[in-house]
Image: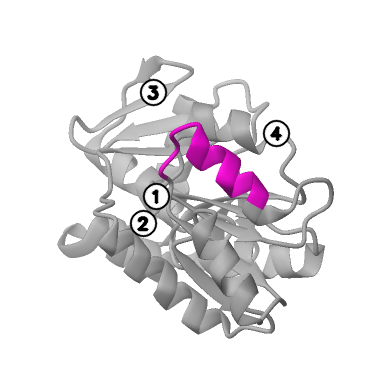
Amino acid sequence: MQNTNIEIVVIEDEEDILELLEYHLTKEGYSVTGFLSTENVERFIEEEHPSLMIVDRNLPGVEGSEFVSSLREQGYEIPVIFLTARDQDADLEEGFMRGGDDYMIKPFKVRELLLRVAALLKRSGIKESDKVKYKDLVLDLHQHVLSIDNKPIELTNLEFRLLHTFIKNPHQPLDRDFLRDEVWGDDAVDFHDKTINVAMNRLKKKIDPSGEKEYFAPVWGVGYKLL
């Protein structure tokens, strides 16, 4: 997946639905930040400049379309997909009038939502930037430079590819065969299991010398995952 630096905000007050959306959007390769209400969302948008928002209309405090309407009045043009159980024509019209770009009625099919997300991003002309961000790690894909807290960290090309592969697949156990194909590719002539262990140890020492941040965790019998 190549969408990791496309940030999507999900505002949904039902935790199980929020977790479902976060899981599937992340699996598609997007960076996802979820909120259970509109609280703190505006500040996040101002700081992070997300590419798209998925907003439930039945939110605590401020109704979802009213929140989007207030964002539009302030000049924010972030594409918005509304989620709602309201399926009357008047409700749909109200949602579009208040700044929605697309609409999905609950219960919805996850696959359809993912297709609508991709289509709306394409229509909006949103493309990947040259930078990928994960927690405090920022990869500049053009310059091949890693920064942590705005400080450049020297990585070899292989270490850069290794870290980028994990960032594209966060929270997922990556097995050694996958890492070999993704990172080493045609250079994996003398490759064996210890090759990855050595590379991972070097990478961890460079990005987390004190071992306090614990970016990675070993997955017994499989490989590693980015926490």
Mark toward the start of the polypeptide (2 vs 4): 2
* Residue plotted at (43% across, 36% down): 203
| Amino acid bearing label 2 | Asn
| Residue 165 percent location from the top left of the image | 38, 53
Local secondary structure at mark 4: loop
Which quarter of the rendered picture does the N terminus lie within?
A: bottom left
Q: Residue at x 50, y 76 (%)?
A: 113
In the rendered structure, which segment of residues is drawn in magenta? 66-77
The label number, if any, that marks residue 6 in the structure image:
1
Return the x and y of residue 200 as percentages of the image width and height: 46, 44
Secondary structure category for the residue under label 2: loop
Between circles 3 and 4, the one closer to the viewer is 4
Report the disc number at residue 152.
none
| First in residue order: circle 4 vs circle 1 | 1
Q: Residue at x 50, y 31 (%)?
A: 74
Give the labeled residue for mark 4.
40
- Comparing 68 with 184, the one in front is 68
Q: Do the residues labelled 1 and 2 touch (CB within 8 Å)?
A: yes
